[in-house]
Amino acid sequence: MGDWEVRLIGSGGTTEREAAGIAALLRGLVADGAALGWVAPPSAEEVGALIADLVAGVPAGDTASAVAVAFTAGGDEEVAGFGYWRRYRRPTHRPHADLEELAVAPGRQGLGLGRALLSTLIAAALRQGVEVLTLDVRGGNTRAEALAQKLGFHQYGRLENFVAVGDARHDKLFYALDLRELRGPAAS
């Protein structure tokens, strides 16, 4: 993959350096106005608790998370992207999961990292028997919309002026990927 790779975060968790890199990535993106669910940049402790929660769900197939690392000229790794999904908690929704975050560093966008992260997470969902993978996108995030559509997600709804960022309001767009269709009839 050139100067970067994507890997799933297993039940062993992340290294301290990866966790710090994920926190820095999310903090920077939110500070720049990215639609990641936070109004203010999350603290390192918040991100650490998120990662711990995601890792705890790995053995049961309740979560999957992936990190994209870029290799620097000096041979070091830096976090260039992060994403995860979680199964829905309601018993009637347990066969399904929601992609809650997909984030790529601004300097690494347009290189295929988002697609690789999302593809890795879709593959993990398939392995874990997820039937439908959902995600939502803040209206106006055309890159995220285009990526979801390229990988087979279809828009199934919109809530107008739903996302509140200060005084600004944005639409919330809902997408779904039916993984049962990818598995075929014998695997359903």
Image (cartoon, rainbow, N blue to C red):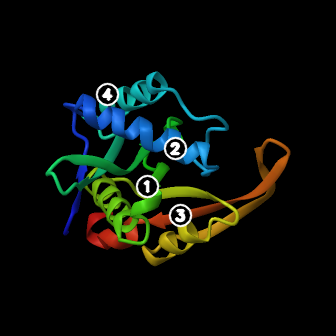
Q: CA distance from mark 2 to mark 4?
A: 26 Å
Pointer 1: what residue?
A: 105
| Up/down of 143 relative to 74, above or below | below
Q: Which residue is at a point 53% across and 63% down the rendered structure image?
A: 176
| Quadrant position of residue 123 | bottom left
Which is nearer the N-term, disc 2 or disc 3?
A: 2
Decide if residue 177 is on the left or right side of residue 40: left
Q: Position of residue 47 (x, y in %)?
A: 44, 30
- Residue 176: give its label: 3
Q: Amino acid at mark 3?
A: Ala
Q: Which residue is at a point 19% across and 69% down the rendered structure image?
A: 2
| Quadrant position of residue 182 | bottom left
Disc number lying in front (2 or 3): 2
CB contact under 8 Å: marks 3 and 1 = no
Q: Amino acid at mark 4?
A: Ala
Which is nearer the N-term, disc 1 or disc 2?
A: 2
Disc number lying in front (3 or 1): 1
Pointer 4: what residue?
A: 56
Disc number lying in front (2 or 4): 2
